[in-house]
Amino acid sequence: MRKQPQVTEQTRANLRAAFWELYAQRPIEKISVREITERAGYNRATFYLYYHDVYELLDEIEDQLLDGLSSLVNDRLMRGERLDFSQHMGTILQMAQRYRGYFEVLVGERGDPTFVRRFKEVLAPLLERFVLPADGLAPQEARVLLEFYLSGIVAAVSTWLSEDEPMSIDQLIDLIVRQVL
């Protein structure tokens, strides 16, 4: 007999939440399946019904965040004819703020380099289309400049989220527009 989809999703959500409580405190290498299942109130066999290992569970969390960001970029932000930095960056920052607990850890000092790379890959088309000059750059120059912009965005988001009382999204955008752009 198959479990109801709601029960399955609730079990997965409980396992993700238990994992995240541990991952927010220490590296993934130091997290055991036993710890996750004890915290979530399940046995190890239940964990293995849904995940191969803790890395697959982390991948699922990252995929959910990045799929949402990718949809946001592709379905809303790439459709315009020009870059509206305040609106585009504001939309990305709203998502980062909504999922602050995840983004703060994943792009922070102990973060997952794979997540940061994938985060940049999602944002790159937006910058390639609206920020990088269409003419005059050699491919190597374009790659370096793109990485400069992407790394700056990741560092700014990471620093902003790590503050105990971060400035508002409008204040952050205003700061960047006044001082950088």
Image: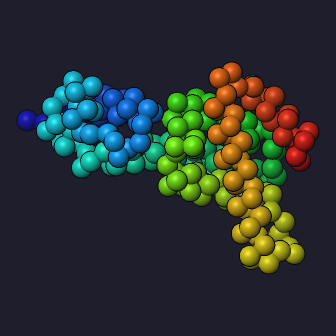
Q: Residue at x 75, y 25 (%)?
A: 168
Quarter of the image with the N terminus in it: top left
Residue 179 can be seen in this image: yes
Residue 19: x %, y % from top left: 34, 34
Nearest the viewer among 129 and 104 is 104
Nearest the viewer among 150 and 75 is 150
> Which residue extends farthest top?
165
Residue 46: x %, y % from top left: 17, 36
Horizontal side, residue 35 vs residue 137: left or right: left
153 relative to 93, above or below = below
**Residue 38: quarter of image:** top left
Q: Residue at x 79, y 57 (%)?
A: 130
Horizontal side, residue 114 vs residue 124: left or right: left
Q: Residue at x 65, y 53 (%)?
A: 123
Nearest the viewer among 24 and 179 is 24
41 relative to 26, above or below = above
Residue 174: x %, y % from top left: 85, 34
